[in-house]
Amino acid sequence: MSKLSLQEQMLKAGLVNEKKLKKAKKGSKKSRVQAREAKEAVLQNKTEQKQRDQALNKQRDQVKLSKEMQAQVKQLITLNQIDLGDGDIKYNFTDGSLVKSVYVKADIQKQLSQGVLTIARLEQGYAVIPTVVANKILERDSEAVIQNEAATTEVAEEDDPYAQYVVPDDLMW
């Protein structure tokens, strides 16, 4: 007895004809192609989902890190803020394009003008902190510290007609 494939046996028995056999072969090839395409689509969807999940996790981590930094900044300011007490001297400074002021004592005013102390944002108001602490805060959040203009040394331009005049540190404006 020779070994015949199932298709050949069915053809001999008269259960199927050539046309049906070709159609069945074509259909099975088609289903294999469709199965492969479906598998590729599933893999692609999994890859895309993984990328979306990674991006979302990265975003969540950044938000968490930002909140931690804000908490650290707030803690640094509150722990190191200098008590202004009942200051009687109005110290003016700029916050962006706005001119703001705090009332300080004479020694604090002098330290602010020399750059030993710096003004920082604290919630809805301002706090006076040592410049050393302000530099640590700047590493975490540059928006929290208001730079003390007197602390920065500006190089006078050669064309400046007032370069020979020195502006006193305790000048009130």
Image (cartoon, rainbow, N blue to C red):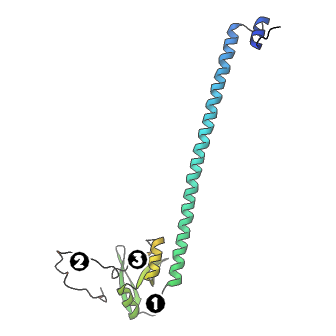
- Is 118 left or right of 26, judged from the image as shown? left
Q: Nearer the viewer, mark 2 or mark 3?
A: 2
- Is 8 left or right of 170, judged from the image as shown? right
Pointer 3: what residue?
Answer: 146
Amino acid at the residue labelled 3:
Ile
Which residue is depicted at the point 53% across and 66% down?
A: 66
Which residue is depicted at the point 53% across and 83% down?
A: 79
Pointer 1: what residue?
Answer: 84
Number of residues whose C-alpha sits closer than 10 Å to that of mark 1, classed few (under 14), some (14–19) or many (20 or more): some
Amino acid at the residue labelled 1:
Leu
When the figure is inspected, residue 67 is found, relative to residue 170, above or below; the finding is above
Residue 157 placement: quadrant: bottom left
Name of the residue lying farthest toward the front? 2
Amino acid at the residue labelled 2:
Ala
Q: Earlier in the sequence, mark 2 or mark 3?
A: 3
When the figure is inspected, residue 105 is found, relative to residue 68, above or below; the finding is below
Name of the residue lying farthest toward the right? 1
Q: Nearer the viewer, mark 1 or mark 2?
A: 2
Number of residues whose C-alpha sits closer than 10 Å to that of mark 3, classed few (under 14), some (14–19) or many (20 or more): many
- Is 4 left or right of 49, judged from the image as shown? right
Q: Position of residue 32 (x, y in %)?
A: 66, 25
Q: Is residue 76 visible?
A: yes
Between the residue at mark 2 and the residue at mark 3, the CA separation in whole angstroms equals 23 Å
Element type at mark 1: loop
The circle on residue 156 is 2
